[in-house]
Image (cartoon, rainbow, N blue to C red):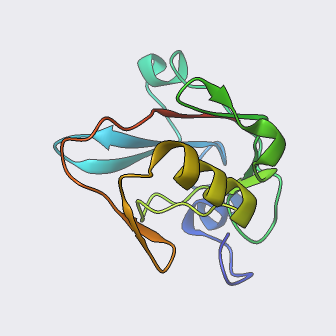
Amino acid sequence: MGFTTTPNFLDIAYSNNLISSPVFALALTDPINQSIIYYNEIPPEIVNETFFVPVVGNVYWQVQIIGLTVGNIDMTSISATIAIIDSGTSYFYLNSNLFNSIITNFFSMCNNNVNTPICPCGSNYPTFSFMF
């Protein structure tokens, strides 16, 4: 998936019977090796701790957002319905209504320069919780 219709390497390997399943797991929080892709034989400790989320788009790795809270405020009604999962970036995109609401309610201490908040270190920021 991405900007092209060219199959990814896992799709190619599966279609050529080089791996037994097209399912894979991507570990994003491994502190030593960064991201790790598990395929073919996913360790049981990963499978048992993994929640599988269906992809809903066919151009990007899109997943359905079913809930969003910032701090303890439910913002589901003004959030987008789709999230794009990208292990190569730390950015995420918000619709303008949600962005403005979050900036107003939680980041008033930040300098909002061209829709990119620049915030002081050491401030108490809310937790973002996405439900997919």
Q: Quadrant of the C terminus?
A: top right
Q: Residue at x 43, y 25 (%)?
A: 43
Q: Residue at x 59, y 55 (%)?
A: 85
Q: Is residue 90 above or below residue 50?
A: below
* 97 or 132: nearer the viewer: 97
Q: Position of residue 17 (x, y in %)?
A: 65, 55
Q: Is residue 5 left or right of residue 29?
A: right
Q: Residue at x 81, y 66 (%)?
A: 58
Q: Is residue 60 left or right of residue 35?
A: right
> Is residue 24 something one can see in this rendering?
yes
Q: Is residue 129 above or below residue 56?
A: above
* 68 or 89: nearer the viewer: 68
Q: Is residue 131 above or below residue 123?
A: above
Q: Position of residue 72 (x, y in %)?
A: 58, 23
Q: Residue at x 64, y 67 (%)?
A: 12
Q: Quadrant of the N terminus?
A: bottom right
Q: Position of residue 97 (x, y in %)?
A: 74, 59
Q: Is residue 73 left or right of residue 122?
A: right
Residue 45 position by quadrant: top left
* 22 or 128: nearer the viewer: 128
> Is residue 39 something one can see in this rendering?
no
Total labels: the figure holds: 0
Residue 96 position by quadrant: bottom right
Q: Position of residue 14 (x, y in %)?
A: 66, 56
* 101 or 66: nearer the viewer: 101
